[in-house]
Amino acid sequence: MATGQLFSKTTQAVFYNYKQLPIQRMLDFDFLCGRETPSVVGIINPGSEGFQKLFFGQEEIAIPVHSTAAASSMTGLKQPTIRVVAIIAEGVPESDTKQLIGYAKANNKVVIGPATVGGIQAGAFKIGDTAGTIDNIIHCKLYRPGSVGFVSKSGGMSNELYNTITRVTDGIYEGPLRPEVKMIVVLGELGGRDEYSLVDALKQGKINKPVVAWVSGTCAMLFKSEVQFGHAGAKSGDEMESAQAKNQALREAGAVVPTSYEAFEGAIKETFEKLVEEGKITPVKEVIPSQIPEDLNTAIKSGKVRAPTHIITTISDDRGEEPTYAGVPMSSIVEQGLGVGDVISLLWFKRSLPHYCTRFIEICIMSCADHGPRVSGSHNTIVTARAGKDLVSSLVSGLLTIGPRFGGAIDGAALYFKDAYDKGLRPYEFVESMKKKGIRIPGIGHKKYKGDSRDKRVELLQRFARSNFPSVKYVEYAVEVESYTLSKANNLVLNIDGAIGSLFLDLLVGSGMFTKQEIDEIVGIGYLNGLFVLARSIGLIG
């Protein structure tokens, strides 16, 4: 690297304490400048290890994440190819900082920080949030080097000076010592004596490039007492540290010092144009920066793109003051005293069903809530719970056994009974056709209940339906099938699955609120098995 050069297009950094936005801005700056490799090679995030995904242009990259900063900083200093370590951190202990600084001095290396606000070399490298957003960087033309070196005591004022310098010159490069820098702009502030080192350098001829300088804080003289400004060092103290004294000293040393901050831009412009006329500066050619892809979320918010939704829900809406179920406000559901059956009708069937329908749903849930510990679902749940697993794991282990042999025959029963009835098959024709196909009839048969000891739950459901449903043709057909199967074996009774499946067909058809296509879809998707899953979850949790 050239004398005085800290950064180049190959400079890389380790970022302390993960902050996505400043790191992404560094990577966007890299891409904007046409760098071949990302400048951020690692992230220090206390207590975390792994990788963080970010973008380098359009390509998503993975940056390693480490847990400590001091050790990694020392490791970086010990690498022969690393000359500068910039530590953007607030939490590095003072003892560690002293060790880093001591090692750096002994080995002719540079530590920027800890707690630095950042830095930038136009067209090459950016540290942290320096220069702000990509839009500001493009506006200030920091994506390519200019001819002006800029030194500022105020990080907060840097952005304003980037903009000012770009308006009246060919832009910023980096520090004052580089040969590419033809003039220097300095922004100081009251308090401290750093500016006098520049005065001495000008008087001794160590700096022979034109310097345009301004020390802010001239208003401090208007206050009767000492004033503390925004920075720790920006304090109106003795006369030598005042802005007026520093400006006068710089002016006497040969720097161009305007009479006010408002005249600062004009002084920079005049000095630059003079150097161009003298042939000492050849304004750099403008280049077109690489186009940074815009983040999808940002583009959507600005209305530049339209993004299709990935998930559409038609059952509930939480965008208003209160959630609604199929258009019915939650407050209305509570105020009307509606029950679980009504909520299921809204969320599952997207409509408000008659009371006898929702009451039937609730009876199904109560009837199927539990049936002892001997069935596979209960057995699995008990074993899992006794093994020390949590409630959700125990519940799921039981639910996963639901199928044709345990509680999952409701859909199958509805499907086969509906198909046989709609085709006009007589009960014995249906049974014999299933036998020839080698298919067990879903909803027929039980290990416990027999023809002379029926399931009370089945009787209860049938009694309710015959008293309240407009039509019970499907369950009557199922009962006729049962009569035929009982002539074959005493345990081939209509079980709870068959009763619910056939009765739910009567509910769907008799209510007059569903089309044939909707009924076929409900049976095909597995809604009816969902009743058993919901109901038995109550018992399994208990």
Image (cartoon, helix red, strand yellow):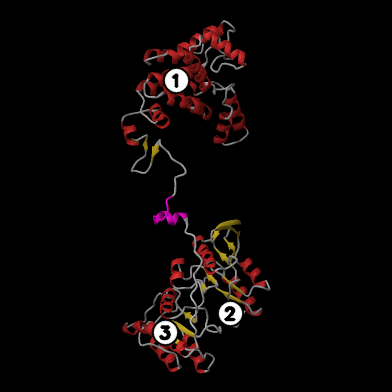
The residue lying toward the viewer, choosing from 279 and 207, is 279
Q: Is residue 244 visible?
A: yes
Report the disc number at residue 268.
Answer: 3
Tell me the kind of residue under disc 3: Ile
Crowd tier of the residue under label 1, counting other residues whose Cα lies within 10 Å: few below 14, some 14–19, many 20 or above: many
User: Is tag 3's residue or tag 1's residue first in the polypeptide sequence?
Assistant: 3
Residue visible at 45% across and 21% down? 364
Q: CA distance from mark 1 to mark 2?
A: 81 Å
- Residues drawn in magenta: 296-306
Picture quadrant where residue 232 is located? bottom left
Quarter of the picture holding the N terminus? bottom right
Q: Viewed as shown, does residue 405 lie left or right of 322?
A: right
Check disc 3 and report its element: helix, strand or loop.
helix
Which residue extends farthest top? 487
Estimate the x, y position of residue 312 in percent, counting from the top left.
Answer: 43, 40
User: Is tag 1's residue or tag 2's residue first in the polypeptide sequence?
Assistant: 2
- Position of residue 265 relative to residue 336, above or below, is below
Estimate the x, y position of residue 242 in percent, counting from the top left.
Answer: 40, 86
Q: Mark 2 sits on what residue?
A: 5
Crowd tier of the residue under label 2, counting other residues whose Cα lies within 10 Å: few below 14, some 14–19, many 20 or above: some
- Residue 43 is one of the magenta-drawn residues: no
Q: CA distance from mark 3 to mark 1?
A: 86 Å
Tell me the kind of residue under disc 1: Phe
Q: Mark 1 sits on what residue?
A: 504
- Residue 301 is one of the magenta-drawn residues: yes
Q: Is residue 492 visible?
A: no
Residue visible at 59% across and 8% down? 489
Estimate the x, y position of residue 114 in percent, counting from the top left.
Answer: 55, 71
Q: Viewed as shown, does residue 129 lie left or right of 356?
A: right
